[in-house]
Amino acid sequence: MPETPGHRLTQLGQHAAVPATPAEAVLETIANADPEAFFVVRLTCPEFTTLCPVTGQPDFAHLVIDYLPHQRLVESKSFKLFLHSFRDVGGFHESTTLAIAAKIRAAAEPRWLRIGGYWFPRGGIPIDVFYQTGAPPAGLWLPEQAVPPYRGR
C-alpha cells in the first residue's frame, strides 16, 4: 500500500467496503507535494444521497467543496467511500453538510475550506447550506460554485 510519512493508506488500490456510517468512515489524506503553494482543490459530488431522519425517504444534494490545502490533501477514494456512507443514514440537510465539513477539517487540516450543499426539494422546498471557515485568504483565486438554484419543472 502507498505510504506517506506517518500515514498509511488502507483503501486506495484495493477493495474497500463502504463504511456503515459516516462516523466509521476513515477519510485518508496524502502528503501535499508543495505545502507552501497557494491553490484551491475542488471536490464535487453532483449525486450525493442520504436519508430524511424523519421519514426515511431519500434526500439528494449537489455538493461543491473548495479547500486551500496545507500539509495534507484529501485522498479521493476514501472521500468517495465517506460520502457513500451517508446513503443509509438519516440526517437533516444542515447537520449533514456540517458533518462533511468537520470530517474534512479534522482529516486534512486545510488552511481554508468552504462547502456548498445544494439540496433538492424536500416537501417542495429546496434547502441550500453554505459553510466556510472564514473569509477566503487574500489573493486566492476562487471560482464560483456555479450551481444554479433549483427551478421546478
Image (tube, rainbow, N blue to C red):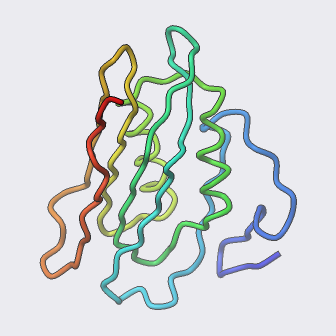
Residue 140 x/y as whole percent: 21, 78
For the point 35% across and 89% down, which residue is it?
37
Task: Locate residue 38: give its quadrant.
Answer: bottom left
Task: Locate residue 34: give its quadrant.
Answer: bottom left
Residue 13 x/y as whole percent: 82, 70
For the point 77% across and 61% down, which residue is it?
11
The quarter of the picture where the C terminus appears is top left
> Foreground residue, 127 or 112?
127
Residue 19 x/y as whole percent: 73, 41
> Foreground residue, 104 or 18?
18
> Foreground residue, 61 or 107?
61
> Foreground residue, 134 or 81?
81
For the point 83% across and 75% down, which residue is it?
1
From the viewer's perspective, tell me whether residue 92 is left or right of residue 137.
right
From the viewer's perspective, tell me whether residue 40 is left or right of residue 73.
left
Task: Locate residue 142: give its quadrant.
Answer: bottom left
The answer to whether 4 is drawn above or below residue 99 in the figure is below
Q: Residue furthest top?
A: 55
